[in-house]
Image (tube, helix red, strand yellow):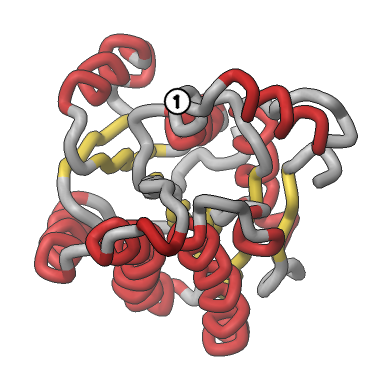
Amino acid sequence: MRFVGQRVIVTGGTRGIGKGIVKEFLKEGATVIATYARNDSEAEKLKIEFQEFADKIDIRKFDVSKSSEVEAFYNYLDETYPSIEVLVNNSGIRKDNLVPLMKEEEFKSVIDINLTGTFLMSKYAVKRFLRNRFGRIINISSVGGKLGLAGQANYSASKAGQIALSKSMSKEVGKKGITVNCVCPGFIETELIADLPEEQVKAYKMQVPLKRFGKVEEVAFAVKFLASKEASYITGTTLDVSGGL
């Protein structure tokens, strides 16, 4: 119960990796504000599944890439909670295509959600963290941001941007007791990769030294560690959860 008395924001927190992160923080006693943009049915499922934590979970719907909606969300937090301690930027989308065939909208929308969303959520969070001279920001990037993946130029660019953003921010806010880090998952068993062709899945698994895809819980544990007070001297870095990629 290391996070009792703390408030944790998890964007994209109603399914996949985000859902796993929400669960781990709830088990540790935190109050979790899980956000999502579109899928109301998944949000309802989350409420039902986590009924035992009903008094500790708050689900909010808005678009992290829209500055006005992000600001309204933080204004709501100011009115509802005494403070916010942890932000996990997990919202992310994929729109894969080869660069010659990629539409401008496919590139821009991925950058908007994955990178601009991280910037906006972090910008408003830091203002709150400064009040207590404490805060943890963990950005869920990807090994694709370092390796590059064919057909994912937009996604890889957004994830590389998250890593660079984290490094820059960590230098700006470190003296205020705020740490900023990235977790870089490899291939994790979620709906985000469920649409990959079977042959591509086999090929990807062959690239992984551990010869399997990771589990959501394995990513969530890494996030929880970086959010802990014990990780107070770790900032501006990336932690790969990739099976050795």
For the point 71% across and 68% down, the residue is 237
The quarter of the displayed image where residue 230 is located? bottom right
Residue located farthest toward the front when viewing the structure as drawn = 100
Above or below residue 198? Residue 92 is below
x and y percent of residue 205 in the render? Answer: 75, 28
Looking at the rendered structure, the kind of residue marked 1 is Asp
For the point 77% across and 24% down, the residue is 212
x and y percent of residue 39 in the render? Answer: 20, 30
Q: Is residue 220 left or right of residue 234?
A: left
The quarter of the displayed image where residue 130 is located? bottom left
For the point 57% across and 68% down, the residue is 160
**Is residue 177 in view?**
no
Classify 10 Å Cα crowding around label 1: few (below 14), some (14-19), many (20 and above): few
x and y percent of residue 122 in the render? Answer: 39, 69
Q: Is residue 181 left or right of residue 242?
A: left
Work out which quarter of the rendered image holds the N terminus and state it.
Answer: top right
Q: Is residue 154 left or right of residue 49?
A: right
Q: Nearer the viewer, residue 195 or 5?
A: 195
x and y percent of residue 223 in the render? Answer: 62, 46
Q: Mark 1 points at which residue?
A: 195
